[in-house]
Image (cartoon, rainbow, N blue to C red):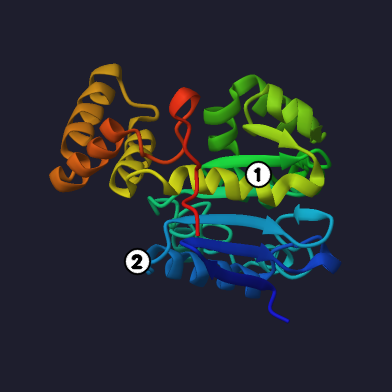
């Protein structure tokens, strides 16, 4: 069976890391399979959202310590290798393919360690099972994050959380991850995929032009001066609409028929059969 299960259903791509016997550690083969799947997801016009999860009791333990890391320690990390590696991070999404503007949801079903944490952080929305655990154990092995873990921990959770997790190399549980904004919600383990699919449906009811422009804008404004941020937002926001689509969506709003309405004029999130 493939080390990555890749399915497509109803505009959603499902990627399941499938090495449960190795806690879904990413070996060179899985690293390439992920890159290929993300490239396909980006190119497929019938797909708008992806959900990434793991099989078994782990999301991912990160780079395989037996097959991925040791070869890098035997002198292969030349200047040219480092330059090439900087183009594409672990599994592709952590660096290089992070500019896929279609939303990616992480359904974190268990341990997300090291590169597994980096992979979860590279997703746009993280939903955690009550059993999920998050950790950066690299310092115990003689190195630290190199595929976006430090950058995204600081951007998402702040320097204090990043310093504690990386310097102590101790894990945090799902509730602590929720408190520090690492995940957006924690759900019962058996409800994890249903919750991820619900969030996907909330995204799918929207204009995908607007969704992708919003994601691009958020990525573009991180770390920039305020004036640059405001300019980027204004340019992207006012140029993102397609007139025909926007007028059609406004018509549904006026008719009180748009999906997922709340209150007196409540409508279902998903269309009926």
The residue indicated by pointer 2 is 45
Nearest the viewer among 197 and 121 is: 197
Nearest the viewer among 80 and 129 is: 129
**Position in image of residue 177 (x %, y %):** 71, 30
User: Mark 1 and mark 2 in contact (Cβ < 8 Å)?
Assistant: no
Who's the residue at 55% across and 40% down the image? 125
Secondary element at image label 1: helix
Residue 1 is left or right of residue 205, and the answer is right
Per the model, the C-alpha gap separating discs 2 and 1 is: 24 Å
- Picture quadrant of residue 80: bottom left
In the depicted structure, whether residue 49 falls above or below residue 186: below
Nearest the viewer among 11 and 113 is: 11
Q: Residues within 10 Å of mark 2 (few under 14, many from 20)?
A: few
Q: Earlier in the sequence, mark 2 or mark 1?
A: 2
In the depicted structure, whether residue 103 falls above or below residue 255: below
**Position in image of residue 2 (x %, y %):** 68, 79
Who's the residue at 39% across and 30% down the image? 222
Who's the residue at 20% across and 27% down the image? 234
Q: Is residue 111 visible?
A: no
Residue 112 is left or right of residue 243, and the answer is right
Who's the residue at 21% across and 47% down the image? 245
Q: Is residue 164 visible?
A: yes
**Position in image of residue 91 (x %, y %):** 57, 61
- Picture quadrant of residue 26: bottom right
**Position in image of residue 194 (x %, y %):** 67, 49
Q: Which mark is residue 269?
A: none
Q: Quadrant of the N terminus?
A: bottom right
Residue 57 is left or right of residue 24, and the answer is right
The residue indicated by pointer 1 is 195
Residue 155 is left or right of residue 253, and the answer is right
Q: Residues within 10 Å of mark 1 (few under 14, many from 20)?
A: some
Secondary element at image label 2: loop
């Amino acid at each position: 069976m493939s080390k990555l299960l890749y399915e497509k259903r109803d505009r959603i791509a499902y990627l399941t890391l499938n090495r449960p016997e190795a806690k879904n550690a990413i070996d060179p083969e899985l690293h390439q399979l992920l890159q290929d799947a993300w490239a396909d997801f980006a190119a497929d016009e019938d797909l708008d959202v992806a959900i990434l999860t793991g099989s078994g009791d782990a999301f991912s333990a990160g780079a395989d310590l037996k097959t991925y890391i040791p070869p890098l320690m035997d002198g292969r990390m030349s200047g040219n290798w480092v330059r090439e590696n900087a183009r594409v991070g672990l599994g592709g999404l952590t660096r290089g393919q992070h500019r896929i503007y279609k939303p990616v949801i992480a359904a974190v079903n268990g341990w997300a360690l090291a590169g597994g944490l980096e992979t979860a952080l590279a997703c746009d929305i993280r939903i955690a099972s009550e059993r999920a655990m998050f950790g950066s154990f690299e310092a115990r092995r003689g190195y630290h994050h190199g595929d976006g873990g430090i950058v995204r921990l600081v951007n998402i959770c702040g320097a204090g959380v990043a310093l504690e997790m990386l310097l102590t190399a101790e894990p945090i549980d799902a509730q602590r991850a929720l408190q520090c904004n690492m995940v957006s919600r924690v759900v019962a383990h058996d409800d994890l995929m249903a919750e991820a699919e619900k969030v996907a449906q909330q995204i799918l009811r929207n204009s995908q032009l607007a969704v992708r422009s919003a994601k691009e804008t958020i990525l573009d404004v991180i770390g920039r001066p305020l004036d640059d941020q405001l300019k980027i937002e204004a340019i992207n926001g006012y140029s993102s609409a397609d007139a025909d689509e926007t007028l059609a969506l406004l018509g549904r709003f006026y008719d009180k028929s748009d999906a997922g309405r709340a209150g007196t004029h409540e409508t279902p999130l998903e269309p009926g059969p």
